[in-house]
Image (cartoon, helix red, strand yellow):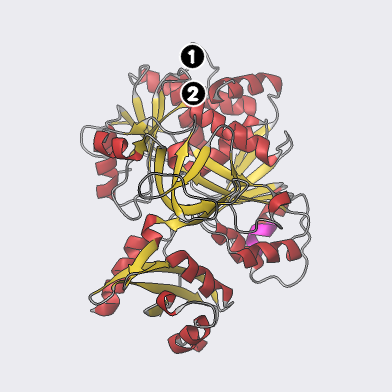
């Protein structure tokens, strides 16, 4: 299999004028994109870049980020994407942890730690040159250090080679049945695993990406995709929830033919409503991990009726096995921690030998996610290890509580966390965004939840917010919710 850089260079020759990327009014054909990646590489080399060097990116513009990523790979280096929305202290910690030789920024006034070499990559003026003298990174060399989001703990640097990154994209592209005329709309930040995965997945079949900064929701999202001629969308369940929730009538879908949802749990009722109001749109529910370079499982639309709520089957040679505490495989439909094995699993965590050893076990990568497989091997996610709490000795799934809240139809968003309790150990606390804030009453919500949830699952509190704090990939930021909870108790 050709790796990502080889594929890009080949497509720039075979279909040079086909559009690869459009963002904020700027468009790039395959040939134009290669010239910009080569331009960034030339600038890096002029500053002293050499094969094997690490280059961190503090870039949120899609074109600047992706051109820099391929520039580093075309020169045999290692890319370290950094989350530009993090506090400055966290960014400095990540830079110190990853030890890059260069950090690329959009402007000279972007703060950096003292002594770090900077290269400015301005999205409005990316340098252009013909690709020449490339020293493309080897397929099994370290290609990327992608830090986990760190929403509940200290981020870890996932080390991955280009073979795995490329293979993940190719397998997902095959699962989606992509064509060269497909264009996907994304507004997940490019420095997240999902953003990079969408770009590489579309490129694997010669398709294109339209990237827009900032979340688009509801009718605005549908209108934006229609105007840009997009055939697909890739994002978090929150996107789909906010698109279909307000709709009652069947919508004109234009060229839209598929929707990819991943990163969190997609409520069954949303799947059912999508099929009513957006008929003809094929929904692919997915489950992924940074530690496998992106997607891990795909549920095709053909399986929605029989396995609604599943994330599907593992892609390629990947295997997902629920295992009990003693390491033995769980029976079908028995809940246990999920272990992953196959060629896409990471090389390890950067400079974390103990954590790596604990995670890469004899049974494969220990995900920290809990779920089960059915008799046919389809995977069902029940939540993170942190989503399963013990309340007075009884197991409680915060995911089930969240799904029950959303099923009430009163909220546009919800998240549930575990709170310490002196008597019971832990209790679930819910945060909700009411559709009618003036009508919100906690007592009424709890009364209605009693119809569908056991007493052990009822939230100890239901707190109304104007918005749930979420990462760029749509995951609830538990640390901020915990801070809000502590503030409420003061």
Q: Residues within 10 Å of mark 2 (few under 14, many from 20)?
A: many
Q: Is residue 289 above or below residue 2?
A: below
Pointer 1 or 2: first along the chain: 2
Q: Residue furthest top?
A: 133
Front one among 311 and 473: 311
Quadrant for residue 363, please give it.
top left
Q: As drawn, is 279 to the left or to the right of 211?
A: right
Q: Is residue 265 above or below residue 317?
A: below
Residue occupying image coordinates x 40% and y 50%: 324
**Label for residue 75?**
none
Residue 202 coordinates in the image, percent (x, y): 63, 36
Residue 66 coordinates in the image, percent (x, y): 50, 34
Question: Marks 1 and 2, Cα distance to the nearest angstrom?
Answer: 12 Å
Is there any visible trace of residue 465 in the rendered image?
Answer: no
Q: Secondary structure at mark 2?
A: helix
Q: Is residue 91 above or below residue 103?
A: below
Front one among 248 and 446: 446
Residue linked to disc 2: 39
Quadrant for residue 483, please give it.
bottom left
Residue occupying image coordinates x 37% and y 17%: 51
Residue 15 coordinates in the image, percent (x, y): 71, 24
Prevailing secondary structure of the magenta residues: helix
Residue linked to disc 1: 134
Q: Residues within 10 Å of mark 1 (few under 14, many from 20)?
A: some
Q: As drawn, is 240 to the left or to the right of 71?
A: right
Q: Any magenta on residue 312?
A: no
Q: Which residues are magenta?
A: 219-223
Screen quadrant of the N terminus: top right
Front one among 350 and 219: 350
Q: Disc 1 or disc 2, which is closer to the eye?
A: 1
Q: Is residue 174 above or below residue 257?
A: above
């Amino acid at each position: 299999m050709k790796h990502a850089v080889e594929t890009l260079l080949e497509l720039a020759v075979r279909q040079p004028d086909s559009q690869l990327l459009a963002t904020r009014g700027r468009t790039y054909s395959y040939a134009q994109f290669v010239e910009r990646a080569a331009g960034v590489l030339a600038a890096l080399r002029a500053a002293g870049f050499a094969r094997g060097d690490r280059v961190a990116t503090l870039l949120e513009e899609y074109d600047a980020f992706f051109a820099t990523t391929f520039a580093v790979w075309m020169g045999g280096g290692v890319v370290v994407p950094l989350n530009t929305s993090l506090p400055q202290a966290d960014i400095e910690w990540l830079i110190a942890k990853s030890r890059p030789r260069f950090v690329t920024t959009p402007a000279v006034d972007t703060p950096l730690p003292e002594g770090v070499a900077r290269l400015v990559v301005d999205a409005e003026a990316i340098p252009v040159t013909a690709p020449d003298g490339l020293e493309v990174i080897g397929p099994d060399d370290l290609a990327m250090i992608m830090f986990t989001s760190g929403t509940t703990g200290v981020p870890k640097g996932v080390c991955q080679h280009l073979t795995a990154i490329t293979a993940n994209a190719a397998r997902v592209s095959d699962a989606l049945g992509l064509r060269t005329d497909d264009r996907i709309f994304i507004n997940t930040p490019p420095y997240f695993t999902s953003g990079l995965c969408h770009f590489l997945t579309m490129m694997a079949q010669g398709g294109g990406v339209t990237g827009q900064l900032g979340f688009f929701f509801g009718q605005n999202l549908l209108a934006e995709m229609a105007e840009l001629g997009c055939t697909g969308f890739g994002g978090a369940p929150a996107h789909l929830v906010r698109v279909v929730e307000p709709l009652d009538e069947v919508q004109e879908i234009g060229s839209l033919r598929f929707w990819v949802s991943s990163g969190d749990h997609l409520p069954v009722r949303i799947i059912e409503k999508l099929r009513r109001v957006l008929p003809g749109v094929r929904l692919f529910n997915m489950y992924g991990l940074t530690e496998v370079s992106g997607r891990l499982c795909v549920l095709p639309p053909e399986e929605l009726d029989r396995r609604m709520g599943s994330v599907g089957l593992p892609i390629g040679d990947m295997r997902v096995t629920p295992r009990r505490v003693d390491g033995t495989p769980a029976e079908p439909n028995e809940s246990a921690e999920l272990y992953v094995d196959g060629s896409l699993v990471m090389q390890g965590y950067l400079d974390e030998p103990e954590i790596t050893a604990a995670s890469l076990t004899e049974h494969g990568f220990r995900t920290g996610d809990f779920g089960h497989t059915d008799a046919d091997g389809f995977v069902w996610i029940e939540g993170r290890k942190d989503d399963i709490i013990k309340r007075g000795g009884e197991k409680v799934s915060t995911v089930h509580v969240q799904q029950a809240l959303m099923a009430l139809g009163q909220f546009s968003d919800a998240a549930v966390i575990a709170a310490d309790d002196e008597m019971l150990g832990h209790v679930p606390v819910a945060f909700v965004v009411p559709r009618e804030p003036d009508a919100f009453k906690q007592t009424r919500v709890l009364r209605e939840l009693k119809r569908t949830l056991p007493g052990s699952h009822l939230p100890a509190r239901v707190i109304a917010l104007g918005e749930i704090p979420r990462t760029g990939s749509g995951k609830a930021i538990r640390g901020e919710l915990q801070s809000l909870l502590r503030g409420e108790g003061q």
